[in-house]
Amino acid sequence: MSTDKAPESHDIEQAVESPNTDEKTNENDNTETEESPVNTKLNHYNFVNVAAFILNLLVTYGIGTLGWGNRPTNGELSDKYQTIITPFSTSFIIWAPIFLLQGIWALLWQFVYCKQRNHPAVFAIGYWYLIVCLVQAGWTLSFSFEINWLALIFMLSILLCLGILHYRLQQCIDEKQRYTWKGYLIWQLPFSLHLGWITAASVLNINVVLVAYGASANAQFGFAIASLVLLLIAVGAYLAERPNSDFAPPLALVWALGGVYAELQNPSGSIVRRFSSSQIDGFQLGVLITMCVAIAAVALKLGLVLFERFRRSKN
């Protein structure tokens, strides 16, 4: 344990008499730093994260996409509980990069690339990734059995847990790593993209519950408008977060809004029967305006970040 203390007067005098002492000490310190080994041993978090990823992948893809156990797929249930804010089916392809990035993080960076096994971010994430995967598996199961109120609770729980995980990473990753492509792609993007999409999915899930439990068309339309406001607030919140703005969550929300706009270009029969043409056209215009405002906010924030970096480089 270090016992460093402020230098006394005779220490200072000795330093003046022997000016090369500090240089030798610094050289020794540098040598020790360069020679200090990186801990490459596997820890229990590495195994937990891999197991969580595999579980989430099997449940989400097996039940949600393939319909294992003779259960309806997420696509079939999405059509059954169609809302005016349901995105175009192609929008859900965003799950591919989410799972790909998280798979690379869990399998490659924690096992193959040994130097990352004991990165501080691994310990900052702790068991939160496991919790996220367990809760997401719970959502998939409850939605497949059409227990929609329980699915909503699970969805909001995913959002909460991902928010905590994201916050812990933001506090852990130092500025040097945060502003490099490698550091961002490894430690933030897999979870930031997930967080942004789950934010949109949470708002959608509330609308699904209204449809599932027979809310009136006016109630559904009213909350759909409120949903656009919520999504815009979320964009602003992600852009304003500290210590560092993360552009992946708001861009995922822009992607979701684009999917809603595309779906309303040719709305399904259930939407046409439920809402008037003026409501559909008006809501589509509202989606477009919300999306444009969100894009403008992202562009403005990006410009401010780049300007700040340029100003720092000049100083």
Image: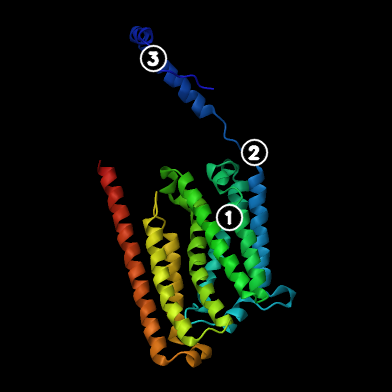
Three-letter amino acid code at disc 2?
A: Lys
Three-letter amino acid code at disc 1?
A: Ile
What whole-number distance in Å separates the C-alpha atoms at marks 3 and 2?
Answer: 39 Å
Q: Residue, x 42% and y 69% (percent of image)?
A: 231
Asked if labels 1 and 2 touch by Cβ distance under 8 angstroms, the answer is no
Residue 122: % across, % down: 57, 46
Three-letter amino acid code at disc 3?
A: Pro
Callout 1 crowding tier (Cα within 10 Å): few <14, some 14–19, many ≥20: some
What whole-number distance in Å separates the C-alpha atoms at marks 3 and 1?
Answer: 50 Å
Residue tagged by mark 1?
104
Which circle's residue, 2 or 1, is located before the other in the chain?
A: 2
Residue tagged by mark 2?
41
In the rendered view, would you say 258 is above or below 135? below
What whole-number distance in Å separates the C-alpha atoms at marks 2 and 1?
Answer: 19 Å
SS label for mark 1: helix
Residue 183: % across, % down: 47, 48
In the rendered view, would you say 307 is above or below 253? above
- Residue 7 numbered tag: 3
Residue 12: % across, % down: 35, 11
